[in-house]
Image (cartoon, grey):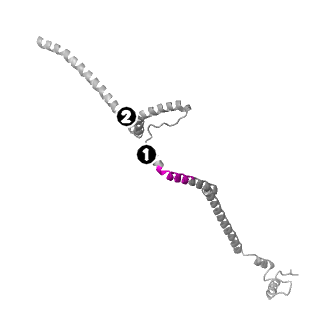
Amino acid sequence: MAAASPWKSASEPSAAGVFLNHLVTSGIVTEEMLNISKKTDPCFVNFSRLQKITNLQAEIYQKNLEIELLELEKDTADIVHPSFLAEKCHSLQSMNNHLEAVLKEKRSLRQRLLKPMCQENLPIEAVYHRSMVHLMELAVTFIEKLETHIETIRNIPRVDANLKKMSQALAKMDILVTETEQLAENILKWREQQREISLSIPRILAEENHL
């Protein structure tokens, strides 16, 4: 007895169901062939996977964008943070108040700057008198050697050039010393030759007179 066809409906069978049942009964098609035909097409499965991959890539891109925004916010937090802005505004306000005070006292400040400061005593506590004496001695010594210090500082960039010139001068001096030694040796040899010649002259003259 043939098995019941899955294409049969519980109610009145359709024309397609009757036709397929007839094909199964006659052996033209089998139940396995019909079951395979009911499976999902692989292309639709691949399309679904591709859609999932695309969605995951979009989600990853969105997360990376959010991470970059968080890092940017972290880097600029010390600039755009309300407490930092409030501190900066306070500093600017203090500077503005100071400039306003300077502008208000501009005339008196100009007169003080034009007034000579010589022969004026600065009040110093007695505890610091000894230190001030020592400080004045150091100041006088520094002023006396100021030109030397300035010249030394000016010569610092030329130290390498001076060292190079010194090395060249030492090399030339070595050459001159060598030449001087050779010249002294030649002079000694010449003197020895002259002494021998002077000693041989009387002997030669005596031989000539004998002849």
Q: Amino acid at mark 1?
A: Leu
Q: Secondary structure at mark 2?
A: helix
Name the residue carrying label 2.
Answer: 166
* Residue 37 falls within the magenta-colored stretch: no
Residues in magenta, as a range: 94-107
Asked whether, in this view, residue 62 is left or right of residue 121, the answer is right
Quarter placement of the N terminus:
bottom right
Quarter placement of the C terminus:
top left
Label 1: how many residues lie within 10 Å, few (<14), some (14-19) or many (20+)? few
Q: Quadrant of residue 34?
A: bottom right
Question: Which of the two marks, 1 or 2, is nearer to us in this view?
Answer: 1
Residue at image location 54% in from the left, 54% down from the top: 96
Name the residue carrying label 1.
Answer: 114
Q: Quadrant of residue 188?
A: top left
Asked whether, in this view, residue 175 is left or right of residue 15, the answer is left
Q: Residue furthest bottom?
A: 15
Asked whether, in this view, residue 41 is left or right of residue 2, the answer is left
In this rendering, the count of numbered labels is 2
Residue at image location 63% in from the left, 59% down from the top: 73
